[in-house]
Amino acid sequence: MWTSGIRILTLACSIVFGLRAMQSVDAETQLREARQSLTGEHKDTENARKLLLGIAQDGKAKLSPESLVYVYVYLGYIEDRAGNRPLAIAWYEKALAVEGSFPGILAVAKAGLQKPITWIRHLDSVEPPTAPRTSANSQITDRPLAKNLSAEQRRENFEVLWRAIDTMYADFDLKHIDWTEVGQRYKERLATVAGDDDFYLLMFQLVNELKDTHSWLQNYKAPTLADVADLPIDLFEGKPFVVAGKKAGWEVLSVDGLTVAEKMEALRPYLHACSSERAYRREAGRSLLASEKESPATVKLRSPDGKTETLALPRKWGSGNHRGTQTVVPGLTRQRFVHFGRHPSGLGYIRIESFNGRSEIADEFDRALEEMRDAPGLILDIRDNPGGFGQPRIVGRFLQKRTLVAISYVRNGPGHHNFDRRESYLEPTGKWQYKGPVALLVNDVTGSAADLFACQLRSAGRVVTVGSTTHGNLSGVADYAVLPCGLQVRISNAYLSDAKGRPIEVNGNIPDVTVEPTILDYLNGRDPVLDRAVGLMTK
């Protein structure tokens, strides 16, 4: 039976702000242990309940508002999973009575008053579970996509998706999107759709019109592209170059008879949207030789001395070969997420490859910072860090007082201009804070939680940023909708700005000092961004 679309749980977004600095080490440890007990398939809910109840009874006065809301929501989640609905509702009500928390976890508490919460993104998985839950919550199960849709059913699903985005999405004005015009344009395309594959691809492309890295179809993947395996490409100073092999250093002039700009545009319907054009160009540049067909690639190259050559190269499904991240700092101590060591200048160097983890990243950073405690200056490198979860505990290691670090604007009504404005503060964390000068290295891949990290440190005035403008990928919490055909859609319904009110989504964090490596820098193992930062720090 076909029904209208359903707006479902508002869940914590892929950018989760995390916990503010806690005043009690015991409460912090208990909350961390409780989260670990609740994370993953094999949960120890009894241990988590015991820890959380202990905090709620004895340690709540020592927690920040955000942390306390997490405690109450986790307790509600535990009771919902056990089928104790009245107790769960009571915990969600307590969470909503706390003032001063971030919107992401509060949205979960609000949703918990309406329906049982038996799945939370950061505790369970990236996707909602495949197993059915209860009839009250069955809309968010991972049911298969409907097949053999009629023209009328395709129109209905299209309208549901268009309306869901119209009522939930936050960034229409920020991105100068005329959503009515987009809808009319796609309606015309819808009339020419012949089958299910074309229809679902059209829906994928409709969401891509938002140019929002955090908005996507949860349970649909665009068709796989065939690529060339042995000619890795990347962009330097806006131009694509071969970065390895016999043709390393050669510039790509055209692909399949298309200019580089034309080829990038031809790839757009098949690549996930990026929040800024510079980030999309990076992604498209690395996929420049890809195609929706497994036909040979015709690639025209130009050597460093000006000679041109055209190659015919085979494409294969699942291929792709991109450059790795380089660093010229020798002898780094490597951990899972955070690597550190001394630069020859005597400065401390800490590289955070990803924020795709929670307390373990902050723990690794604490170990790194302890080793760098006596460094006269510190270089933090988050280039090529695509994000994950927010890390306020790390930011707090550089603060001397409670500091405004970001402002969020959360969509709160049907109108495109209905927003709640909420200020985000962080406090000092750890037994001591690093007070020396800090340089933060960024580039156009730095995004999501890494963009948030840069925003917070810059808003606090604690870093000089060096490199190139970040991705600009910082929408806030997300709403989810389920379409009658089974499509699950994630829609950004907030955006974040720095402490001065400047949105980071689209704009990115613009570095204080702009430095972009050349292809010769890369091939010769030079890092001009790091060198410039060292120069600034040693003056």
Image (cartoon, rainbow, N blue to C red):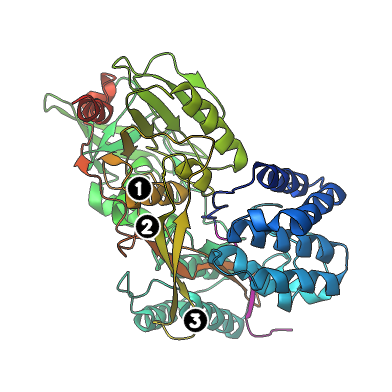
| x and y percentages locating residue 523 in the rendered image | 27, 22
Name the N-terminal-most of marks 1 and 2.
2
Q: What residue is shown with label 3? A: 167
Q: Which residues are magenta?
A: 1-13
Residue placed most toward the observer, 499 or 298: 499
Q: What residue is shown with label 1? A: 284
Residue placed most toward the observer, 9 or 300: 9
Amino acid type at mark 2: Arg
Badge 3 local density, few (<14 within 10 Å), some, or many (20+)?
some
> Does residue 3 appear in this view?
yes
Badge 2 local density, few (<14 within 10 Å), some, or many (20+)?
some
Q: Quadrant of residue 242?
A: top left
| x and y percentages locating residue 194 in the rendered image | 53, 73
Measured Cα–Cα span from mark 1 to mark 2:
8 Å
Say left or right for 347 vs 59. left
Measured Cα–Cα span from mark 3 to mark 2:
25 Å
Name the N-terminal-most of marks 3 and 2.
3
Compared to 405, does 301 lie above or below?
above
Amino acid type at mark 3: Thr
Say left or right for 352 vs 298. right
**Of the numbered discs in the image, which one, if any, rests on residue 268?**
2
Whether pointer 1 and pointer 2 mark residues with C-beta atoms closer than 8 Å, the reply is yes
Badge 1 local density, few (<14 within 10 Å), some, or many (20+)?
many
